[in-house]
Amino acid sequence: MESVSVCMATYNGEKFLQQQIQSILEELGAEDELIIVDDASVDTTAEIVLSFHDPRIKWFPNTNNRGVNASFEKSIEFAEKDIIFMADQDDIWVSGRVSVMKNALRLSGKRLLTTNSTCIDADGKAIEISLGAVSVLNSESHLKNILDILLGKGNYFGCVMAFSGELKKTILPFPRYIESHDLWIAKAANLLRSNQHIEDITLLRRVHGGNASIVKRNIFRKIRSRFVFVRSLIELVRRVYL
């Protein structure tokens, strides 16, 4: 049975972190690991993490703030298990998530699996907000999936992904210029034609004022994102095919 590395990047996450870590640990076996890279938090994040006294938690604090992409990159570098999950600091994992995602990834034979989520507010109450969803029918529509990412319609979020450790050979190191580690990983898997979607809800995704991943972008940032997309795609083509 494949073992699991969960990669989390934290930054001033004291408000929701304990509940999220608890939901993750309940899903893990004794041989699994939760790797937490903290990006120089100045709140009680460290105290919360260390209070669990759980040997499955591996704690790596940055000495200075490096940003979310660099912190996730570091956590993935440290991951030693067969399957890698990514986790944000403020969500809640659905019971049975790891089993469902491990089985789906194994059965697909692909390197990346993406699932869906439902939203909750800061108090943990369900809210009707759509952040997009993946469809199983589009799993092998690799070109369409890449174009959807370009158009801002690709519903790939790291918090609902799991991927084979084999994918590390392609995605690491992250280029410094990328805006989103999860879209970088999704583009890599689609270029490799090794991408699977399932429509299961595996996460309660918390929507609140501090969410870095859902901040609205102005027109200038959208234009810049298109240039970054092209540059990153060229780099991935080089890694995959050359």
Image (cartoon, rainbow, N blue to C red):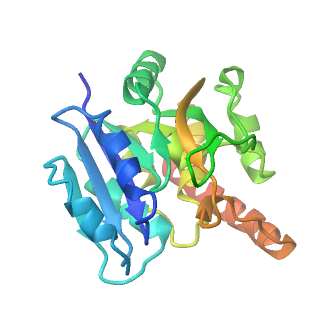
- Which residue is rendered at x = 33% and y = 64% of the image? 37
Residue 241 appears anywhere in the view: no
- Which residue is rendered at x = 53% and y = 57% of the image? 181
Q: Nearer the viewer, residue 179 or 101?
A: 101
> What percent of the width, then of the height, locates residue 208?
63, 59
> What percent of the width, then of the height, locates residue 201?
57, 29
> What percent of the width, then of the height, locates residue 211?
60, 62
Q: Quadrant of residue 205?
A: top right
In this image, 106 relative to 60: left or right?
right
Q: Quadrant of residue 71?
A: bottom left
> What percent of the width, then of the height, locates residue 168?
38, 48
Residue 64 appears anywhere in the view: yes
In this image, 72 relative to 129: left or right?
left
- Which residue is rendered at x = 47% and y = 63% of the image? 174
Reply above or below: 133 against 108: below
Reply above or below: 6 against 232: above
In this image, 222 relative to 12: left or right?
right
Q: How many marks?
A: 0
- Which residue is rendered at x = 35% and y = 41% of the image? 24
Q: Quadrant of residue 129?
A: top right
Question: Which residue in the rendered view is the most extreme toward the top?
Answer: 107
Question: Which residue in the rendered view is the most extreme toward the bottom?
Answer: 64
Which quarter of the rendering shows the N terminus? top left
Reply above or below: 95 against 225: above
